[in-house]
Amino acid sequence: MDLPGRQHILTHSDAPTKTLLVVEDDRATLSLYRAGLKGLQEFRVLTAQDGRQALDVLRREPVHVLVTDLNMPVMDGFNLIAKASCLHPQVPIIVMTGLDESQHLNTPLQMGAIRILAKPPRLTLLMEAIRSAAQFQPTGMVRGIGLNSILQLLNWEKKSCTLTVKPETGMGLLYIKAGEVVHAAYQAEEGLRAAYEILSWDRPDIEFVETCRVERTMDLPLTELLMNAAMLTDHHRPEFGEA
């Protein structure tokens, strides 16, 4: 039985390597998608019933494809697309909607979605679109070079981008404008606390997308940010989330 606010996970015996997030407020439709998308054996399927739940999922873990309805309570699909394309530009977005083009005016595409499908879509078409979207690659992946070194290079070049930082488990996000870290997010934390946690990770994988659309929440120069992070690590700071 479905319970409000709970995300559902489907697993497959062949250990899926990608994660799909489906956002739909109608439980019957959501059940149909969950049953029909079992054919996507390479995907672990998560679901959310509104945009706010979806953002919580995106904040917690890597998602490779986001599929969303537009007309939903709490936070509709338009707001979800705007926030997701801003905060998580590495995640391709597919829209399913019962609205015709005269009603949505292709606004989701202008906001960052990559495809709009009429609702209800044929499952074969939806699966094809999801597999195609999963081929989307971030601008680049960096391995074998420390996060501090990457940030210093970006600072020297005055680059703007979004970094997805992946340790062995979890995921953090660093937002860079003109070479400075202007925002960070890790699980429920944002700003400096999230930045210091991310900067403490040892040899994470790093992906970057050459866009940064978030507003500045941090004012520390990069050199000071890195120095503070090193001091916190050296002094065996408390576990993340403690006072």
Image (cartoon, grey):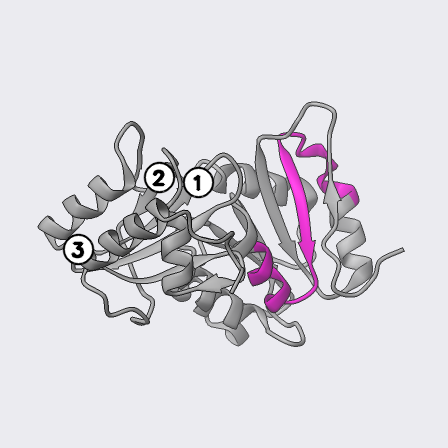
The amino acid marked with disc number 2 is: Ile
- Badge 3 crowding class, 10 Å Cα cut-off, few under 14, some 14 to 19, many 20 or more, is some
The amino acid marked with disc number 1 is: Lys
Is 11 above or below relative to 117?
A: above
Marks 2 and 1, how far apart at CA: 6 Å
Marks 1 and 3, how far apart at CA: 22 Å
Q: Report which residue position mark 3 lands on.
A: 223
Residue shown at the point (18%, 62%) measured from the top left: 221
Residue 70, given in percent of the width and then of the height, sits at 59, 68
Answer with left or right where residue 186 lies relative to residue 191. right
Is 62 above or below relative to 6?
A: above
- Which sits in the foreground, 121 or 23? 23
Range covered by the magenta-colored residues? 35-57
Is any part of residue 66 visible from this angle? yes
Closest to the camera, between mark 3 and mark 2, is 3
Q: Report which residue position mark 2 lands on.
A: 206
- Disc tally is 3
